[in-house]
Image: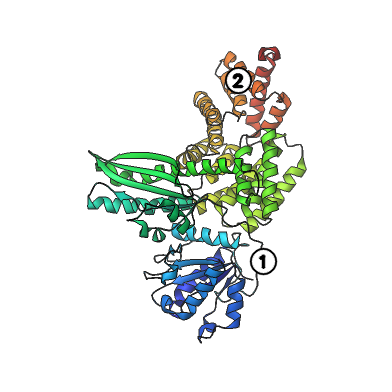
Amino acid sequence: MHDIFLSYCHDDFSTASRFAKGFEREGFTVWWDASLRSGEAFDAAIENALKSAKAVVVLWSRTSVQSRWVRAEATLADRNRTLVPAMIEPCDRPIMFELTHTADLSRWSGDASDGTWQGFLADVREFVGATGAGPSAATSPQVALAGVPRPAATRGDRPSLAILPFTNRSGERADDVFADGMVEDLILALSLSGGIKVIARSATVVYRQNVSDLRSIGRDLGVRYLLEGNVRRIGASLRVTAQLVEADNGAVLWCQKFDRPLNELATLQEQLVMEVAAQLGDRVERVEIEKALSKPGDLTAWEAVIRALAVMVSFNLESLNVGLTEARKALTIAPDYALGHAVLAAALGCLYAATGGRDDSLAREARTHVERAVALGVSDPLVLSWAAWGLAGCGFWQDAERYSQRAVDLNPQIGVGHLALAMVCVRGKRPEDVIRHVDALESLAPRGNVTHNGMAFRGLAHYMAGRYEPARQAMEKALLLRPDFVYPLKDIAIICEKLGRHEEACDAVRRLRSADPTITLERIEAFNLVSLIPPDVATDMNKVFRKVWEETPMESLT
């Protein structure tokens, strides 16, 4: 059994070789061999490989669309629901495949960091069920004779989105180019986010003139969400309006308008795309969390992971234990789900830190799941980011930095990757680097599920730099974003005491005790010493906090 069966025409051998090398570089096993294509008989060896492959990648070109051989392979793959087509040059696909989502890789030259290639890899990974076992040791793109079979995770795990062609309501031809460019750039930005599967533009252009029946479009494209948009001129500004629609019922989940001055549009276009993508990504994440939390049963592995992340990031003992249970549930559903292993490692690492590092079995189990997650998802930045989080929680800082840096190198648009790097930089006493990564997180996910953690890290960065008032403001913002995230209250108490505002410091302690009646001085001190705070900084913080704690009478809670 191989991960990928590569279907192509002999005339496209050099391009097929580039694809095979690209897949093997990502850790996939690939079945392909031009020597078996000398005849037109449907060879038994090819048929067996085709039927057993987890994903069949068909390379459409002007010659392959005419090949009876390639068309037969595509038809069988479509019947087996393993078809993952790509267009390697402009061509008219066979009519039965015109409505099948097809990635446009006609301009891909082999660059592993190319956004369109990364988006296509995400599609392939959904079919294979993992991101490969690691970089292949093979040195040639010949047939991979062996591979380790891996059970596939539940299919359709990530939310899927199609961005329909934006309508130009201004009548200016130049705005047609801008509208098309917005769609292309949004597809790239959202694909790179890692959390959303975005359908290629080539599959949606047919709806340029007909978007009346959104439910039918959603069914045809097999997506959960649709994004509609239009552009029009308002005086000296260009307005972009976008709305997110649930494909099943046509409900509008989000709508927003964005105005930019026409004379600055060329320089502000990238900023506009990132702002739209950030707000849209936040909204899809929130809808997915609400759906997963309200679902009574029959969860997918993705939904179990979403439930785990939704609760554990508040970082109290109860929520961490619930997150741990949900993450374990994901692996019961799909034992070889890379993201499930990574999130379980993160939950274990958080629990280890929150309990003061007293249970070494948590750290050992976290390490085991990190190793499994990375083996399955060596090139998945989302997996690497949460694996780094788990390692950091258990004090494995060198490996945490290595994995989080690789995640950001692979995809700078992954917010949680910047968050993991910010955490590492707090530990390394590099406050300006912390702020740089938190700024990146905030621009990518201004109201995301983990952004409150970034605000707390920003507060710690300012604190270490002696900027106490900005530190307090950042901690208060973390609480505003996530009121049940109570740990910043201990830091606010310390900061206010440093500022000479003793009554405000005592009030922060009272707020902390009221929010978590089980909290103890010993638990706070142990947490500070085993968490991301550098040891010398933690020792000084504990000294200040103990003073405020002891000078805040328990009876004042009433």
Is residue 344 visible from the viewing direction of this image?
A: yes
Q: Which image quarter is the N terminus in?
A: bottom right
Q: In x, y percent, where is residue 136?
A: 60, 67
Q: In x, y percent, where is residue 314?
A: 61, 34
- Which of the two residues, 218 or 186, is positioned nearer the viewer here? 218
Q: In x, y percent, where is residue 132?
A: 60, 62
Secondary structure of the residue carrying numbered label 2: helix
Q: Residue shown at 30%/46% (left/top)?
A: 231
Give the mark, 1 or 2, whose residue is nearer the N terminus.
1
Q: Which image quarter is the C terminus in?
A: top right
Residue 149, numbered circle: 1
Label 2 CA crowd tier, 10 Å (few <14, some 14–19, many 20+)? many
Q: In x, y percent, where is residue 190?
A: 45, 50
> Is 181 left, or right, of 528 in this rendering?
left
- Which of the two residues, 433 or 191, is positioned nearer the viewer here? 191
Q: Quadrant of residue 51?
A: bottom right
Tag 1: amino acid: Pro
User: For the residues carrying marks 1 and 2, which lies nearer the camera in this image?
Assistant: 1
Residue 508, numbered circle: 2
- Which of the two residues, 188 or 430, is positioned nearer the viewer here? 188
Q: Residue shown at 62%/28% (left/top)?
A: 486
